[in-house]
Image: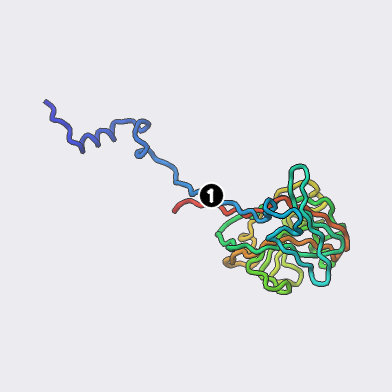
Amino acid sequence: MTPPLTAAAALIAFVLFVPLAHRPPDFASAPPTRAPAPPSIDLLRLDAADDNAAPPAPWRSRAVRGERAPDVQRIDSAGLSFMRIAGTARAGWLFRSVAPPLDAPRGRLRWTWRIPVAPIGTDLRDPATDDSALRVFVSFGPLRSFGRLPRTIFYSLGGPEPDGYAAPGHGLRDVFVVRVGDAAQAGAWRRVNVDPFADYRRAWGGTPPPIAVVGLLQDTDQTRRRAVADILSLHWSPDDALDP
């Protein structure tokens, strides 16, 4: 007569002889658990803005010294809400602080824009024609003075510059300009996404500080031409991360 199996022996027999597909989930291998994706941050916040605000809070505007700021308005059209920035021979900032600052090791800045009217004769390579219908910028530190920017990257719509053009600002060691398309070809809504922390390392090296300010700049003070730019969305999306 075969002696009864002990509890330990019964467990060993179960593990050895029950097919893997029929074993409890604890015995099957599973992929690493992925942490939930950090939430995307809506930086434009047009949904919470007063229809009459220009620009909508928490955005603020300021003219470039010696110039008039472009006109800013919220527009609701065909089911879309967007911010329109327009001017002729003007230059001005739209900006907002980011609290807490964006300090993830990796992340993407994503936006959707279009350019109904692009200034003629621009060229980011020439300080005499260095205008843009719209630039999205990030500053790695607070804006204490517009005369002395912290390290700042301008993602700029350009003109005849080659694709991939990127260079320090004209005479500005703490400004880096990255061309993100030809304004003359951006009449339809276009999505853009960039990696500011990677571009910081490309421009200056070292570890990027947190991003404390995000903004927009339209400048037509060099060419004295007209520009009309619309921005539909602007989001910060931290990269996903695996649990350690």
- Above or below, 64 against 11 in this view is below
Instruction: Place residue 221 in its image quadrant.
Output: bottom right
In this orientation, does residue 239 appear?
A: yes
Residue 37 lies, with reference to residue 175, above or below; the image says above
Instruction: Judge by depth and name the residue closer to the eye, 91 or 11.
Output: 91
Residue 63: image location, x then y, percent: 79, 67
* Residue 207 coordinates in the image, percent (x, y): 57, 66
- Residue lying farthest to the left in this orientation: 1
In this picture the colour scheme is: rainbow
- The three-letter code of the residue at mark 1 reads Ala
- The quarter of the image holding the N terminus is top left
Where is residue 235 shown, x and y percent of the image? 65, 53
Q: Between residues 6 and 125, which one lies in front from this camera angle?
A: 6
Residue 181 visible to the viewer: no
Q: Residue at x 82, y 57 (%)?
A: 86
Q: Secondary structure at mark 1?
A: loop
Horizontal side, residue 197 vs residue 220: left or right: left
- State the residue position of label 1: 37
